Amino acid sequence: PTDQPTISPSSNSPTIHPSSPNSIPYSISTESLVAFADFADSRCYSGSGSSYTNIIDSSSQYFYGTYSQNSDKSIRLVNTASCSIPASGIHLSNYNTYTVSMWIRRESTQTLCTYTYLIDGRSGFPDSFIYSAAVGDSWKYMSLNGGAYTTPSSSISTIFPLSTWTYLTLVTNEAQANAVIFFASRYTQTEGFDCSIKSIYVYSTFINQTTNYANYLVSSSFVLPTNTPTSSPSINL
């Protein structure tokens, strides 16, 4: 179809309203949304400690390595050392996973680590890695800033502009049961990607390009207050 995607969520979609005064209320598609983390929302993260909460089911998840909360309430994952140094990242476990989206910002040009991992799973999620040399067979599509689905790229040092927020969506080949996901590092918690992450969305079903684009527009209103997309991507489903 060539029609412009519908930007507003459907009327029967539940609405997620962050309760934190530092969060701007917004709504996203929540059908089949099994995990949602907005680190600016006090229901998700208190601002201190290694634990955060999946807003959907109130399960406890965790950060690891060296991390802090930025002034914009995103989580800074410090990965500037050599590959052998324990990495920093975000752990999310035991959800049926088909589509993963996140707001992510590359923080530096890394020179001390040959390989850096954007995402990895392994346990319960085989071949789910994307790192600077390869993409695992579990991933089928990638989308940047609500754009058309394309073949996932391993060029993570170039597809994410430095110091710029990017809305990343990844789609698997098929639903993965009880997936364990490591964001911004290898599953061994090494070879980390130096970045900040603002929010994470995990769906148990395939999210089509129209819904993905709508989610990007809605969520960009609080991550990028001055961002005004000028055109919609071509939708070829």
Image (cartoon, rainbow, N blue to C red):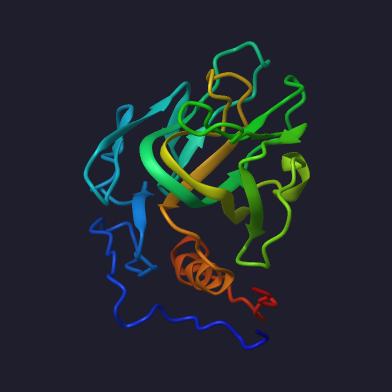
User: x and y percent of residue 197 in the render?
Assistant: 50, 44
Front-most of residues 169 and 18? 169
Which quadrant would residue 130 be assigned to in this image?
top right
User: Viewed as shown, does residue 17 lie left or right of 155?
Assistant: left
The answer to whether residue 164 is above or below residue 91 is: below
Front-most of residues 90 and 6? 6
User: x and y percent of residue 201 in the render?
Assistant: 43, 53
User: x and y percent of residue 69 in the render?
Assistant: 41, 38
Which quadrant would residue 194 be assigned to in this image?
top right
Residue under the image location 67 percent in, 16 percent down: 83
User: Viewed as shown, does residue 76 lie left or right of 38?
Assistant: right
Quadrant for the N terminus, please: bottom right
User: Viewed as shown, does residue 151 lie left or right of 10?
Assistant: right
Front-most of residues 162 and 173? 173
Residue under the image location 28 percent in, 69 percent down: 15
The answer to whether residue 190 is above or below residue 209 is: above
Residue under the image location 50 percent in, 83 percent down: 6
Residue under the image location 35 percent in, 65 percent down: 31
Which quadrant would residue 93 be assigned to in this image?
top left
User: Viewed as shown, does residue 169 lie left or right of 111?
Assistant: left
Q: Residue furthest top?
A: 84
Quadrant for the C terminus, please: bottom right
User: x and y percent of residue 100 in the render?
Assistant: 50, 50
Tally of numbered tags: 0
Q: Residue furthest bottom?
A: 3
